Amino acid sequence: MPTAIDRQELVRLVEEEDAQVLDVLPDREYADSHIPNAINLPLRHLTEDAAAVLRRDRPVVVY
């Protein structure tokens, strides 16, 4: 179930739980600006490619 979080919670998830940060912007927008170490998987490809890119044993934060 998706849950909105703030920046503080994002930092905690990344630092304490090794969360994966997933950026769903198109490639061009991702190239312009993104959170460091974020995984780029454009929204239109999310269902097709997510299993190959994301680890199931770690939390995922989508933005």
Image (cartoon, helix red, strand yellow):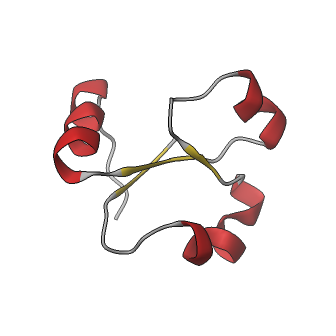
Q: Is residue 32 above or below residue 4?
A: above
- Name the side, left or right, on which 36 lies relative to 31: left
Rendering coords of residue 57 (x, y %): 31, 73
For this orientation, the residue located farthest to the right is: 28
The answer to whether 63 is drawn above or below residue 52 in the figure is above
Q: Residue at x 56, y 77 (%)?
A: 51
Q: Residue at x 51, y 30 (%)?
A: 36
Residue 43 as seen in the image, left or right of residue 9: right
Looking at the rendered image, the quarter that the N terminus falls into is bottom left
Q: Residue at x 33, y 42 (%)?
A: 4
How many numbered tags mark residues here?
Answer: 0
Which residue is farthest top? 32
Q: Is residue 62 left or right of residue 8?
A: right
Location of residue 60 (image quadrant): bottom left
Quarter of the image for residue 7 reads top left
- Residue at screen point 38% across, 75% down: 56
Q: Position of residue 47 (x, y in %)?
A: 65, 73
Q: Is residue 5 above or below residue 34?
A: below
